[in-house]
Amino acid sequence: MTAALKVLQIGPAAAFQDLGRPGYIASGLTRGGAIDTLAVHEGAALLKQSPDCAVLEIASVGGVFEATGPLRIALTGADMTAKIDDATAAWNAAHQMEAGQRLTIGAARSGSYAYLHVGGGFDAPVRMGARGGHMSAGLGKLIAKGDTLPVLPDKGSRTGFYLPRDARFDGGTVRIVPSVQTNHFPPEERTRFEATAFKRDPRANRQGIRMEHDGEGFAAQGMRTIVSEVIVQGDIQITGDGTPFVLMCESQTTGGYPRIGTVIPADLPRMAQTPAGGKITFQFITLDEAVAIEQKDAKARAGLAAKAQPLVRDINDIPNLLSYQLVSGAISAQADPFE
């Protein structure tokens, strides 16, 4: 029988996710899926399986899970404290769990969204071609205490590897391209937008992120004449009071607020993982530059598995073993240490 995870304790916003369900925007449904898709690819690379496998997305606070049988897990995304029974479990790494062992995940120390992966992927129900939840559309449900999370058969075996963490969890520069209404904003407004230091507002979720800033709000010319039209993830709407609002994976599909720009897909994980109060600046780039960045990003994701490193190095995997000083400070048992 395939193993599962029993939920003994869980935070308020955990749900199954995957890479989303494309093709439904015309029907009023955004792609959804994991808000940090890079973390999904990292977990898949650590376990050497498809990134299409369903994962558990955890917002801010983790939980306690008990394995009903042997299974492999990986932990990626926002850095949270983690233990398997009483042993510390490294983050951004893959581990083995045995029947009866408990995984305890604490609160986020950096970032906002963490991911729990299992070998084979979670056996979440398939709805409209995907296993991930889309709460704003009524697809799926939040995970609750007492749930049992079934796991699909695991064909892999690798554990004990980790991936180096990048710098997307503490804010930084987010690159954007011009949007449909960018030219409605005077050049001086666009320049001020790039020069402004924003903070992520605590009022943020999978639908969108409100950005705080000092000074006057931003305004486009002819804002009241803009009609509602299709919008995409990453669009930065400027609301009526001049506040930027970055639309995320569960946003609406149409809107009438003017958009000053659109976050490129490669930087959406940084946008999602910046914690409340984290600092963000926006930088305009050209479409050609964005395409080159996306191509480089896709290549990097495809090469993640090759970058995984052993948590504990095997001496058989160290080609220059003889160059290491393996014995240091050794003395004779018969020598006088004071001579």
Image (cartoon, rainbow, N blue to C red):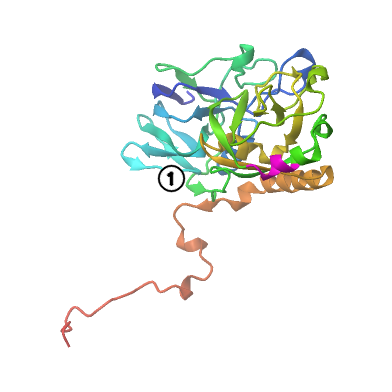
Which residue is nearer to you in this view: 137 or 332?
137
Which residue is nearer to you in this view: 164 or 224?
224
Q: Is residue 119 left or right of residue 261?
A: left
Q: Position of residue 97 (x, y in %)?
A: 41, 36
Q: Residue at x 53, y 22 (%)?
A: 15
Q: Position of residue 106 (x, y in %)?
A: 39, 34
Magenta: main secondary structure equals helix
Q: Position of residue 69 (x, y in %)?
A: 42, 28
Q: Secondary structure at mark 1?
A: loop
Residue pushed farthest bottom? 339
* Residue 244 higher or lower than 38, as above or below: above
* Residue 224 higher or lower than 113, as above or below: above
Q: Position of residue 267 (x, y in %)?
A: 67, 40
Part of the protein shown in magenta: 191-196
Which residue is nearer to you in this view: 111 or 256?
256
* Rendering quarter of residue 32: top right
Residue placed under numbered mark 1 in the picture: 90
Q: Residue at x 50, y 43 (%)?
A: 92
Which residue is nearer to you in this view: 81 or 118?
81
**Res. 49 visible in picture:** no
Q: Is residue 295 magenta?
A: no
Q: Is residue 253 left or right of residue 42?
A: right
